[in-house]
Image (tube, rainbow, N blue to C red):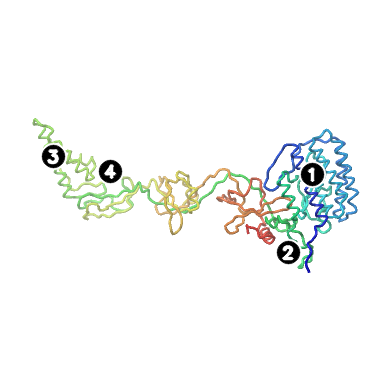
Amino acid sequence: MNAHPRKPRPWRIAATLLIVFGALVVASCSKDEGASTSSTNSTRAPALEREEFPEPVLEALHEALSAYEQARAALAYDRLDDVGAPAALAASSLEEADAQSGSLSPRFQSIVSESARIATSLAEATDVDAARVAFGELSRLLLIIANVDPRVLEGWHVYSCPMTSTFPKWMQPSEELENPFMGQAMPNCGVETDSSVAAPTTLPEIEAHVEHAHEGDISHYTCSMHPSVKSQEPGTCPICSMDLVPVTREEVETGVIFMDAQRRQAIGVRTDVVARRQVSVRIRAIGKITYDETRLAEVTVKYRGFIGKLHADATGVRVRTGKPLFTLYSPELYVAQEELLTALESQRAARETSAPNRADYLVDAARKRLRLWDLQEWQVDEIVRRGESEQYLPIVSPVDGYVIEKNVFAGATVEPGEVLYRVAGLDRVWIDAEVYESELPLISEGQQAEVTLPYLPGRTFQGRVSFIYPYLEDRTRTGRIRLELPNPGLELKPDMYANVELVSERGERLVVPEEAVLYAGPRRLVFLDLGEGRLRPQEIEIGVKSGDDYEVLSGLAEGDLVVTSGNFLVAAESRLKSATKPW
């Protein structure tokens, strides 16, 4: 037996026509003003300028709201028969307000006139579903009117229902929730919200609204206590027998879920604002103190010889520039001294002849030979002054510092090029620190750093980054940086370990709390609080971590509300409701 195609229900056709009709009127009002807006989803209703209504208009609107409240109370108890009379009274009061609004803007008059027509449609509704669609459109237009003069809604509360496929907001004077869209099936469904109104305002959005209305907003029905239950028809949960609630296509496609205030409190959901703050990143590393390589010197000789007396006779002793380290006898050096003295004799003899300068080049060559063998100028002058060669010449230190290596002993033989001493200046030291590969872009040469040592608690040393090594350590995947520190008190000793801390100032950046970020494979997600109890997963790109915050590179805007506590439970429900890309 062939199945007959399901005929569209009359209330669905009526609902669609009312939604489209209401949207077209709002768009028409926007066109009259000459304003145009663009948005990716929906934009706010055309903003009307604030006006103060004349008393007759204000009184008529209050009467319309009073009748609106009677219709709302009837729908909250699923009583269609009690809707017609107050709806007709609301239409009459709105027509009276329209008649008294001659001094107000044409846009306002147009919306009041349309409100009266929608109220008439509500009065003529033949079933509860169609009445609720008309009631939603009437609520939308009344909120637009109330935003012009806040006195209209003084003392009233605005609520929003996430379960309805119509305009979700309504007004009531009582604080006790009575949902006109869900009736007695879910009388307490809803959250208190503001009076702002979102509606299509451009032709493409209206067409999308029409298409969406034909497709229907409900994807399936599920149980609020057992989200794994899914049904294409309304009914009760097979596990707990609770009424199934609708899940919209938006929720399926985007992972949006609804969570009322009571449930939020039960699972500890808290939110925080995405804001712009000064971002500074602290980089901590372990370093090792080393010698300043520019203050290292090796003592060698360029001739063969024999050690005489040792002046620097132990490792660690301090030496000064030009002071003797040891004495050395070298036959070659002795001969070079004799050659200098002979050249001087020849020079003195030439002074008494007709060519007084003929021996000068011999003296210069002999002096230069001794200088090339690392004798100081004052040592050569001393040989000239005495007029005799010195058997054991003193070999002096080329730098100030401390002996860190000693390879000579009294009486030992030394060969040309052999390292006899290694001397290091310790008034300035280096620290080689290892930093993670990801932190290298945050470090630059000249950056200030703080250094602390475990053996000197309470002391802090200031240094700067003097060099960033152009390679990585393959085994640890870390980079090396070099710090320079003055060390006048010699408290910093080579081979000590040090704690290094650098601060990279990033300026003012958009940040999100660390606890708001969820990890889903390579993606980073947060849950946006859209208001009215709705939470939506949002993929973001994060940058550096600063304290308890992450820098936001994309995906969020300043002022967004994100879930910071209970987000794992929120994520679990969102995953059960949909199979969206983020999961």
10 Å crowding of disc 2: few (<14), some (14-19), many (20+): some
At numbered mark 1, what does the secondary structure look like: helix, strand or loop? Answer: helix
Q: Secondary structure at mark 4?
A: loop
First in residue order: circle 1 vs circle 3: 1
Q: Residue furthest front?
A: 2
Comes first in the chain, label 4 or label 1: 1
Of all residues, the one furthest to the top in this rendering is 354
Instruction: Find disc 1 in the rendering and name its residue.
Output: 143
Q: Return the disc, 1 or 2, that comes first in the chain's sequence.
A: 1
Disc 3 designates what residue?
343
Question: Which labelled disc corresponds to residue 322?
Answer: 4
* Side of 124 where 547 appears, left or right: left
Q: Find residue 129 and report its horizontal and vertical position in percent.
A: 83, 55
Q: Tell me if residue 137 comes above or below residue 225 in the rendering.
A: above
In this rendering, the label closer to the viewer, 1 or 3:
1
Residue at 79 percent across and 61 percent down: it is 6
The relative height of residue 4 versus residue 501 in the rendered view (above or below) is below
